[in-house]
Image: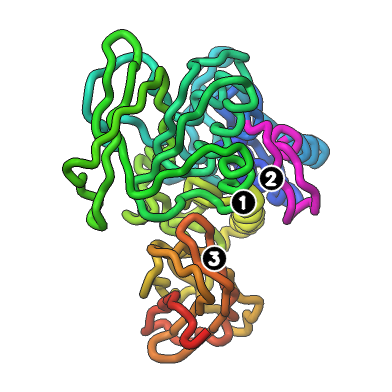
Amino acid sequence: MHDRFGVAVIGGGPGGLAAAIEARRNDAGRVLVIERNERPGGILPQCIHNGFGGDIFGQDLPGPLYAQRFIDEAVQNGVEFQSDTMVMGLDSDLTIHAASRRNGYIALKAGAVVLAMGCRERTRAQVRLPGTRPAGVFTAGTVQRLVNIEGYMPGKRFVILGSGDIGMIMARRLTIEGAGVVKVIEILPFLTGLRRNYVQCLRDFDIPLELSTTVNRIIGRERLEAVETVRVDPELKPIPGTEAMIPCDSLLLSVGLIPENELSLRAGVELDPVTGGPKVDERMATNMPGIFAAGNVVTIYDLADEVSKAGYIAGRSAAEYARNGHGGGGDTVDIVPGENVRGVVPHRVNIREGLDTGVVLSFRVSRPIEGKAVIEVMHGDTLAASVRKPFARPAEMLSVHVKLKEINRSDKNITVNVRAADGE
């Protein structure tokens, strides 16, 4: 099988579906979504809680319904799907190599490609948890699938390591389903998930959160029997004498997500060592001509709506490239993280004369500011934009709009800083 498409999207989650819809709307010709699961939707089908669609649909939707709206719109717009298919390689001439049980090996040619493979969870090995290796240690997403999709309850008494959103949401879900959640512990001195999830999932269900604490030891042979916790100092080193034993049969890990970019690397796409995702410009274009990227494969967003918005940009840009091979505006300016900023998307912006629609810079802070905060965007020594926020927290992405007409020289970088507002 050898077929040709205007735009091919790898990954059928919220970023990929939005990219495919937007590519069709922008006259890309045939648009294909390649999805390794049996159905598109990405992780959304197992996210049965609400909290999706507030920005895009103006409604508070559960994950499966949010996904279905995009799937329905994609079908109505004539997007084609190749499900249950694993992409194995992507050549610089935009040939995609894939395999499926139904078709075996297939090669597809596209006018442009959007990478939307999403992310995966960090495991026990990646956070280096010491101790034995009994059953009962799970990632949060695994337990979410077991409970919400498969209908299994994998334990009775849980400790949750990490205050990420999936962990807090599963603390509530497990409690509703009858399991006990002893506490959530977090090695950092601040929450790493959204504040709304802390309120709705932990505080409303009387589940304690203990900051500056981690798991010191896993105990048990066939099945987890207990975890030993320990307090940590500001350098995250264990404080001797603060150890505590918590009997439990399950440890749920909610210790962060990693953009999934093995395919991007093989395709020659340059990655950001901070975010782990492709470096992109304001069109979500990578360094490889014709290859775009969107969603959690680029950086870990806090809201699915933001993933979809990035998909729209990538899909629109991919369609333009497929039609006329547009490669950007020539000169580019690098965007670099400054004071209290950890990674900015996009990583560079094209300077095109007369273009004044601007670009939205998205980023996270390195440390929380609970009072009023100021975002400053500097172009060299010139202030290009300044925005005030009521607070700045690492778990919640910030954004600022900058007009490109104010960025008219390519010999100076754009720097983003976030600091506490003086005297407020």
- For label 1, count other residues whose C-alpha is less than 10 Å away and answer few (under 14), some (14-19) or many (20+): few
Q: Position of residue 240 (x, y in %)?
A: 16, 43
Furthest residue toward right: 76
Q: Residue at x 57, y 80 (%)?
A: 387
- Give the amino acid at mark 2: Gly
Left of 270 or right of it: where is 106?
A: right
In the image, which is nearer the foreground, mark 1 or mark 2?
1
Q: Which residue is mark 1?
A: 196
Which is nearer the N-term, disc 1 or disc 2? 2
Q: Which residues are magenta?
A: 47-67
Residues marked 1 and 2 touching at CB (< 8 Å): yes
Mark 3: amino acid: Leu
Residue 398: numbered disc: 3
Q: Nearer the viewer, residue 279 or 232?
A: 232
Q: Residues under labels 3 and 1: Cα distance?
A: 16 Å
Q: Are marks 2 and 3 in contact (CB under 8 Å)?
A: no
Q: Is residue 235 above or below residue 418?
A: above
Question: What residue is rendered at 45% in x and 35% in y?
Answer: 183
Locate residue 5: give its quadrant.
Answer: top right
The stretch drawn in magenta includes residue 134: no
Tell me the tag on residue 51. 2
